[in-house]
Amino acid sequence: MKKIHETQSSESYKNVEEDKLYTPIEDYQRIEAGGVYKKNHIKLSTLPKGIRYIGYVLIGFTVITTIIGIIMTIFF
């Protein structure tokens, strides 16, 4: 007999729905969006250009501010 840990399942787990995301708001997603979001449908490149550019600016600002803060902490 193959030795396994006492809490390890002897059966292999088969995930047939690998492309689905499970979230606490899954019921709301079914009501509002008509179904649960799938991993392969979440692509940031498909967002409108305005939203992408705002995101790029916010992320860039956060990164630059963090780097400047670290540099000022070290040298001043």
Image (tube, rainbow, N blue to C red):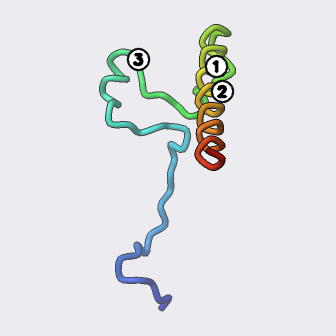
Foreground: 25 or 27?
25
The residue under the point 63% across, 8% down is 50
Left or right, 7 with respect to 73, comes to left
Q: Are marks 1 and 3 in contact (CB under 8 Å)?
A: no
Nearest to N terminus: mark 3 or mark 2: 3
Q: Which amino acid type is shown beneath numbered disc 2?
A: Gly
Q: Are marks 1 and 2 in contact (CB under 8 Å)?
A: yes
Q: Are marks 3 and 2 in contact (CB under 8 Å)?
A: no
The secondary element bearing badge 2 is classed as helix
Foreground: 13 or 66?
66
Q: Hey, which quadrant is residue 31 in on the image? A: top left
User: Does residue 62 sit above or below 71 in this rendering?
Assistant: above
The secondary element bearing badge 3 is classed as loop
> What residue would you read off at disc 2?
60
Callout 2: few (<14), some (14-19), or many (20+) C-alpha neighbours within 10 Å?
few
Checking the image for residue 34, the label placed there is: 3
Assign the C terminus to one quadrant of the image: top right
> What residue would you read off at disc 1?
57
Q: Which amino acid type is shown beneath numbered disc 3?
A: Gly
Q: CA distance from mark 3 to mark 2?
A: 34 Å
Left or right, 60 with respect to 6, comes to right
The residue under the point 50% across, 56% down is 14
